[in-house]
Image (tube, helix red, strand yellow):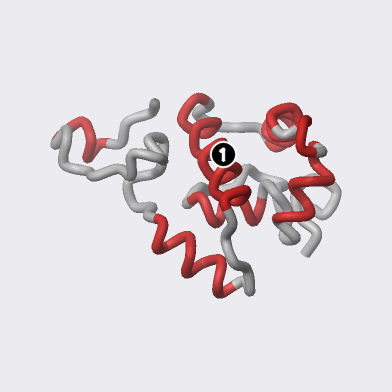
Amino acid sequence: MVKTMQEVINPGASQHDTEFPYAPNEWSREIAINTAKAESMDLTPDHWVVIGALQRYFSEHEQPHIRELHDALSERFHAQGGMKYLYGIFPGGPVAQGCRLAGLKAPAGAVDKSFGSVQ
């Protein structure tokens, strides 16, 4: 997991949700819930699984490329229907909207309708 300067200087100072060990320091469930409400969404257990998967992916890849992330999500959620399933629960795009809810900066091109957003 990539560490921030704050984590290096003051280890153990941040309190991570145990269900989201890869979450950014400034992220919380409450922030995700408020962001979702602002986007007229209610988060379900399915959303939380995707949010956790995005956070983990970002912790393992310093600068994710949009196509690689798209493919990784499709593979990870293949059993549920892949990208069709993900677009169903994230109408703003599983990459663009998913990253917003996960407290992550979406890769360049994520708002391109052909890659990760339908808005």
Name the residue nearer the viewer: 91 or 109.
Answer: 91
Amino acid type for the residue under numbered disc 1: Leu
State left or right for residue 79 relative to residue 64. right
Look at 51% across and 50% down and name the residue there.
102
Task: Establish if 52 lies above or below 32.
Answer: above
Percent across and percent down for residue 35 are 51, 67
Name the residue nearer the viewer: 59 or 32.
Answer: 32
Percent across and percent down for residue 56 are 50, 32
Percent across and percent down for residue 42 are 59, 66
The secondary structure type at the circle numbered 1 is helix
Look at 80% across and 41% down and name the residue there.
83
How many residues crowd mark 1 within 10 Å: few (<14), some (14–19), many (20+)? Answer: many
Task: Establish if 61 lies above or below 31.
Answer: above
Task: Establish if 25 lies above or below 38.
Answer: above
Look at 70% across and 49% down and name the residue there.
94
| Residue on which the image places disc 1 | 54
Look at 77% across and 64% down and name the residue there.
119
State left or right for residue 27 relative to residue 51. left
State left or right for residue 28 relative to residue 54. left
Percent across and percent down for residue 88 are 78, 54
State left or right for residue 98 relative to residue 103. right
Query: How many numbered discs, if any?
Result: 1
Is the N terminus in the top left, top right, bottom left or bottom right quadrant?
A: top left
